Image (tube, grey):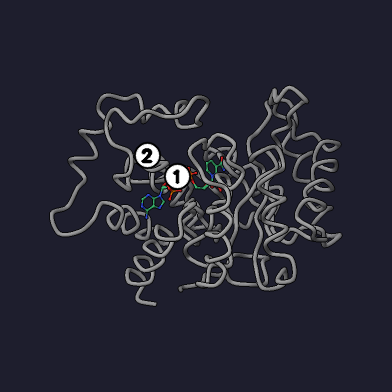
Amino acid sequence: MKYNKIKNIDKEISLLGFGCWALSKHGWKDVNQEEAIKTLEKSIELGINFFDTAPIYGFGKSEEILGEVTRGIRKDIVIASKFGLRWNEWGHVTHDISRDSILFEIEATLERLKTDYIDLYQVHHLDNKTSLETVFKTLNQLKEQGVIKGVGVSNFKLEELKQASNLCDISSIQNQYNMLQTKDEKDILPFCQNNDIGYISYSTLAQGLLSEKVKKGYKFAKMDIRKFNDLFHDRETFDRIEGLKSPDKPLIESAFEYVMKQESLRSILVSTTKVKNLEENIKLIKRLSNQ
Ligand SMILES: NC(=O)c1ccc[n+]([C@@H]2O[C@H](COP(=O)([O-])OP(=O)(O)OC[C@H]3O[C@@H](n4cnc5c(N)ncnc54)[C@H](OP(=O)(O)O)[C@@H]3O)[C@@H](O)[C@H]2O)c1
């Protein structure tokens, strides 16, 4: 497995990162949780050391599972978590990145992950009310205290990333990037390359569309998160996918190859809940990166 350096983080991170959202089952109704946990365990055995989670994934469940599985090997792995999405007892979600909320969230995250530091702490989404000065002042303080090692952002546009970079030494940005969703190529990716900001792609397989797992007319379970993804409703998506297929390789290989062309790419986040798929992904990534 190839490993890459991200600023402020001691350990290099695996090029293939493990996306922990579906572990919680929340939003991914067809997931077999037992098998998902086995897949996480297998990923560690096969050399993945970078795990991306968030409090909102299963309202704490994803962090709890990751904490349980990685108990005892904390120093060997790199954990990325996030803050900014809060929920109430009825599951109603709101955005909050105020100082008080960050300080509340980091404590809860550390407890669920059974650790005393987070390698990469990421703003999940902005909240349209807290100033970036407040957010990054708080994060810089947590960094000075050693509670977090690196600061990351997610779902940021170029102007927001530029402002953030003036307030804090930003280690990475985690954004949606795949063969069908390429808007970051215009400005974010070049900015990352010129400013030593590590790029982490999420939805690299467009939530399954680029794995050929999801065929036209696929019926999602009630409340499945993919029902809210426009790509699944756009009539043109499946025609676009047909156009992306290559006669000499599987679509998933083209999907990995596509994001790997970016120089600032440090890790490709993929979520899988099946050992067979994990093994296939690792084999492909190893071959494509010659490692
Ligand atoms: N920062 C953010 O706002 C944000 C947003 C979304 C996601 N993320 C992060 O990115 C991670 C992954 O992104 P994503 O959840 O959008 O989805 P994704 O990784 O693009 O796609 C996941 C889907 O691909 C399938 N899959 C994976 N490998 C496969 C293979 N070899 N063959 C067939 N199917 C395969 C999985 O099915 P199986 O489980 O059946 O293998 C699953 O349905 C998340 O877990 C999360 O950590 C972050």
- Element type at mark 2: loop
The type of residue carrying mark 2 is: Gln
Residue 181: mark: 2
Label number found at residue 17: none
User: Nearer the viewer's eye, disc 2 or disc 1?
Assistant: 1
Question: Does the CB distance between marks 2 and 1 fall below 8 Å?
Answer: yes
Q: Pinpoint residue 24: horizontal percent, then vertical percent.
A: 62, 43
Q: Residues within 10 Å of mark 1 (few under 14, many from 20)?
A: some
In the picture, the quarter occupied by the C terminus is bottom left
Q: CA distance from mark 2 to mark 1?
A: 9 Å
Q: Residue at point 65% right, 64% down?
A: 78
- Left or right: 180 as drawn, with respect to 27: left
**Tag 1 residue:** 203
Q: Please state the horizontal and vertical placement of residue 29, each as a whole percent of the image.
A: 52, 35
Crowd rating for badge 2 (residues with CA inside 10 Å; few <14, some 14–19, many 20+): few
Residue at mark 2: C-beta within 8 A of ligand 1: no
Instruction: Identify the secondary structure beneath mark 1.
Output: loop
Determine whether the beta carbon of the residue marked 1 sits less than 8 angstroms from the nearest atom of ligand 1: yes
Q: Nearer the viewer, residue 270 or 220?
A: 220
User: Would residue 193 be found to the left or right of residue 89 on screen?
Assistant: left
* 213 shown above or below 70: above
Residue 139 location in percent, x, y?
Answer: 77, 49
Residue plotted at (49% across, 54% down): 269
Q: In the image, is 191 to the left or to the right of 213?
A: right
Q: Amino acid at mark 1?
A: Ser
Q: Position of residue 199 (x, y in %)?
A: 51, 55
Pick the residue in front: 243 or 172.
Answer: 243
> Residue 85 is drawn in which quadrant?
top right
Q: Residue at x 63, y 36 (%)?
A: 125
Question: Between 93 and 158, which is closer to the camera in this rendering?
Answer: 93
Outermost residue, bottom direction?
291
